[in-house]
Image: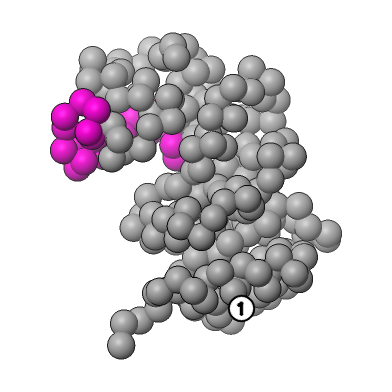
Amino acid sequence: MNQKHKILIVDDHKLFREGLNFVLSQIEGFEVVGEASNGKEFLDMIDQMEVDVVLMDISMPGLDGIEATTRAIAKHPSLKVIALTMFCDEEYYYKMIQAGVSGYILKESGKDELANAINTVLRGENYFSQKLLRNIIINLNQVKNFKGAVLKHEIKLTPRETEILKLICQGLSNAEISEKISLSLRTVEGHKSNLINKTGVRNSVSLVMYALKNNLVEI
């Protein structure tokens, strides 16, 4: 029998937790091992159980998802957290990114995207809803809370890195970039890793914001 990946749900709405629990029970390979209604409950639980992925609400009474994620990742650096969000939570997007989430998914997403998001972060990659990523790009000029890396010196990008960075900023996934420019997926991933290292950011969304704020590409 294949071992199931252990999921912990953190959300202050019981009905939503129960619905999410049911959806996950219909997906092969996943098992919900616990539920928490706020950040404090989550922090108390995370030290007592083995968890592969946390599905974390942002806005909760008491200790919210931002602070809970920050504290949990500081104590458990390998912990993978996917933020659950609505478009009205936009002011919190950037704070959760800074907190170190591995992914971001809209609460309106379907079962297939949820499974894809979890499997993606389990592979050690980041997952950000393309719909959400496009929304972040559109509203980038209004970002006030993002305090990511600031360009302090000229970053030298190769023509290929610039090409791939532009496609990332357009919201294309690694697989879509691979197909579009006829490179292997591994090569695309390598270039993306180099871009993240050169810019000093944490993930794809931070890379997009960094690139556009510092005029590395135009889209």
The residue identified by callout 1 is 34
Residue 196 shown in magenta: yes
How far across and how far down the image is residue 170, in percent? 43, 24
Vertical side of 141 occupied by 80: above or below: below
How far across and how far down the image is residue 16, in percent? 71, 65
- For image coordinates 77% across by 65% down, the residue present is 13
- For image coordinates 39% across by 60% down, the residue present is 119
Q: Secondary structure at mark 1?
A: strand
Q: In the visual, does 147 lie left or right of 188?
A: right
Task: Give, as a single range, the part of the protein colored magenta.
Answer: 178-204
- Residue 100 visible in the shown view: no
- For image coordinates 16% across by 32% down, the residue present is 183
Q: Quadrant location of residue 33?
A: bottom right
Quadrant housing the C terminus: top left
Q: In the visual, does 42 lie left or right of 122?
A: right
Residue 209 shown in magenta: no
Quadrant housing the N terminus: bottom left
Vertical side of 75 occupied by 169: above or below: above
How far across and how far down the image is residue 158, in percent? 23, 17
